[in-house]
Image (cartoon, helix red, strand yellow):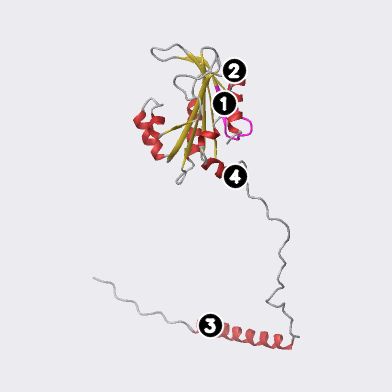
Amino acid sequence: MEEPEQPPRRRGRTAALLAAAVALGVVAGTCVGYLVQADREPTALPPLSQPVLTQAKGPAPEPLSVLGDHKLLADGDLTRLLLPKPPTAKETDWLPAKGSWVDAATFASYYGSPGSAFEWLLDDEFRRAATVGWDTGTHTVEIRLVQYRQRESAAAADAVRNAQDYIDQVPDTDSWPIPGTGNGWAYVHNRPQSEPGSAPRYMARAEAWRGDIEMEIWVSGDRPVPKKTIMDVAERQMERL
């Protein structure tokens, strides 16, 4: 059975009187305001139009140079941002002595699971990469610059942080911040690493980013890599970005 509809409640006499008093108060206040304003002297308001300002004289500022505009620098030839091979260094059979382009498929092949690496490169909006390397006689140096489109996320920064988190878990590793980067770190692994069929090698790495570019540096040799070696290469490479 439905509940019977309740009749509308009527407003009592007190409520009606209060409403009438509020209305009279508003009207009275408005009238007093008009009378007070009418007795005042008229106030002069500033004109709406203002004098036209004269244009400053002198030459316009020069546009930023390529070195002063990171976007122009990063959108140019990425291979030109790589450190050049030192004159005393030697070429290797598997590293380009001059800056060379690397596509996504080739870059993914550097990892243990190329298929998975290729997928996350596409997910991270991989744009392009460039690499260069040389042999100093005691160590081999490889530099990689990886650029991302960064339409959806700060992929360069994320890639560096992921690499740094991984390296921090490697035992017996020393690390130092790279001066002037605010985010870059250099690492020296004090324990040699070995793969089946190859001699043990000591490794050092550096990871940093600037804008949409990730920097990776790998230094390896049959003897421990000095801190000065990895830091010198990392600082000089970051100065070019």
Q: Name the residue carrying label 1.
A: 186
Whole-percent x and y of residue 137?
Answer: 55, 14
Between label 4 and label 1, give the one nearer the viewer. 4
Determine which residue is flagged by label 3.
19
The residue under the point 69% across, 88% down is 35
Q: Could you tell whether 40 is left or right of 129 in the image?
A: right
Decide: is 3 above or below 63: below
Q: Circle 1 — which element?
A: strand
**Residue 141 visible in this rendered orientation of the protein:** no
The image quadrant where one finds the C terminus is: top right
Where does residue 85 sit, x and y in percent of width and height? 55, 24
- Tell me the crowding category of disc 4: few under 14, some 14 to 19, or many 20 or more residues within 10 angstroms, Cα based: few
Which residue in the rendered view is the most extreme toward the left? 1
Q: Name the residue under label 2.
A: 226
Q: Where is residue 8 in the image (x, y as percent from the top left)?
A: 38, 80
Question: Which label is found at residue 69?
Answer: 4
Q: Earlier in the sequence, mark 4 or mark 1?
A: 4
Q: What residue type is labelled 2?
A: Pro
How far apart marks 4 and 1 lie (CA) works out to 26 Å
The residue at the point 46 percent across, 34 percent down is 129
Note whether 216 is above or below 54 in the view shown: above
Label 4 vs label 2, nearer the camera? 4
Q: Residue 220, labelled with which disc?
A: none
Local secondary structure at mark 2:
loop
Cα separation between marks 1 and 3: 77 Å
Range covered by the magenta-colored residues:
177-187
